[in-house]
Amino acid sequence: MNPAAVQHFDVLIIGSGLAGQSLALRLADTRRVALVTKKTLADSASAWAQGGIAAVLDPADSVEAHVNDTFTAGAGLCDPDATRFVVEHGREAIEWLIERGVPFTADNTPLGFHLTREGGHGQRRIIHAADATGTAVQQTLTEQVKNHPNITVLERHIAVDLITAAKLGLPRNRCLGAYVLDIVHDRVLTLGASHTALATGGAGKVYVYTTNPDTATGDGVAMAWRAGCRVANMEFIQFHPTCLYHPHAKSFLISEALRGEGGLLRLPDGTRFMPNHDSRAELAPRDIVARAIDFEMKRHGLDCVFLDMTHKSPEFLKEHFPTILARCLELGIDITREPIPVVPAAHYACGGVVTDLAARTDLTGLYAIGETTFTGLHGANRLASNSLLECVVFSASAAKDILAAPVEPLPHLPQWDESRVRDADEEIVISHNWAELRRFMWDYVGIVRTNKRLERALHRIHLLQKEIDEYYANYRVGNDLIELRNLVLTAHLIVKSAQRRHESRGLHFSRDYPETLPRALETVLHPPEI
């Protein structure tokens, strides 16, 4: 037996974005923490967030106003308790980040920090670090995580599956840790832990066009489902209205804050179109703007539309949007003089693993935080900049619950068994299935859906799952196979959820059910339903 292949920690955290890193820092003074990340600590969707973090910080603002804006965006599906819980803890979350040294953009107001406004918000309540808030937050916390003696960082490691008492034939089912592939050394480690937290982010890579990093493959949702946890509201995939459209720009987001600061959406001939779709025009919630762009592109046969900021001074754009300005210039687009070509792209999953207000899942010892979860905050459509807030607030509540619980002894945990598998003879199966999955999900389960499209997607998912399960059973696991297995399961959950919603609400729009039902209900799936 290789002792290095079995390691024990007090807490195992899978995922290194804002949710994972903030939880690790809140626990590490008194707990031994392992933080697992597929690439490096810097690679996460959190680091890509541009706009900022929504919180009630201005005396002119109120908790009620933020709650009401969240309810409005959520189209009747926001859980009142969860929404109020997050909003009421918003200031505390921001103060924790400020104490950690996050360099938010300052100004000369009594608050001391500049607040911007984004679509769906009735007030300026977005605290930010220019137009690269996620990077500023991530860099600040990453340095502290790296230097903390109680945090073991496992970079270039990917979780294969959770270890549960039930899988080992033990009584009193609970999570005991996870099997994790060391990608560099190509070996699977057994990481035991009294408490495990999923902070793996979203599933944007299930679609062709996404603003997400390559790591967003639905790992947390898939692992939790296989371990017996419920998932909810998976049909609500937020498509960000404005992703940069350029052959050499991969997944580059054009922040909501541009429209918050007066950006106008135009057709190629310069005509504005948003006032024809919603009275709030460019400041309408994301689902409305994304559908409007999708409609105009199909109506006129366009590859993209244009976001115009040329009415703002170059000085203003350089001060507030330096990252976007610089990236567009690299691609030959001067946003001070010409509009930005944009298209909608898969951006955020509003559903996920069901959790309570302490971030606990259905499985004892297993927590989940951030985009991988369904907390009830986002409803049928996430309000801009509530996602990073959710990460920090629930990392605090999870830490409180974990610290209040005893560190339970672990039973003997077996090593990963590779005795009956062999090396893959060809990788083309994985790459082909990956490309096929993302294409039909984009075509059939995108911004506008129909019963027929969902049936076609489900048929293809069943075929892919059969191939992938056979491949998984016979060959040694690798990073691409693990991600593909998780993606196809997540896609299955998205489609099944979409089929159950016989209405159009928030981010889910069906041509077969264009009306909204009078009563809003969650879509909750229970293993092993699918």
Image (tube, rainbow, N blue to C red):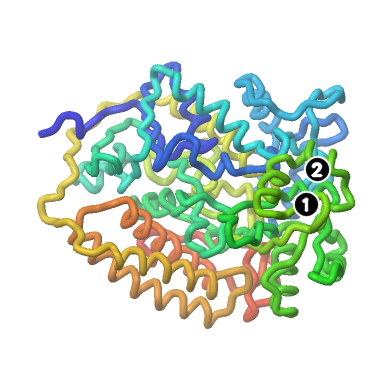
Q: Position of residue 292 (x, y in %)?
A: 75, 69
The first of marks 2 and 1 along the sequence is 2
The N terminus: image quadrant: top left
Residue situated in front as seen by the camera: 274 or 333: 333
Which numbered disc covers residue 317? Answer: 2
Residue pictured at 31% horizontal, 32% vertical: 193
Q: In the rendered image, which residue does mark 1 sit on?
A: 335
Say if residue 340 shows up in the picture. yes
Find residue 44 and report its horizontal and vertical position in percent. Answer: 51, 42
Q: How many marks?
A: 2
The x, y position of residue 155, in whole percent, is: 37, 35
Q: Decide which of 479, 405 is in the foreground and name it.
A: 479
Classify 48 as above or below 506: above
Q: Are marks 2 and 1 in contact (CB under 8 Å)?
A: yes
Position of residue 240 relative to residue 30, above or below, is: below
Q: Residue at x 66, y 36 (%)?
A: 133
Q: Nearer the viewer, residue 10 or 129?
A: 129
Taking depth in this image into account, of 469 and 374 the one nearest to the observer is 469
Q: Quadrant of residue 29?
A: top left
422 on left or right of 52:
left
Q: Residue at x 82, y 49 (%)?
A: 336
Q: Is residue 284 above or below residue 391?
A: below
Residue 243 x, y percent position in the rendering: 65, 57
The type of residue carrying mark 2 is Leu
Crowding at dot 1, Cα within 10 Å, few <14 / some 14-19 / many 20+, comes out as many
Left or right: 322 as drawn, with respect to 421: right
Rendered image quadrant of residue 209:
bottom right
Disc 1 marks which amino acid?
Answer: Ile
Is 459 rendered above or below residue 189? below
* Mark 1 element type: loop
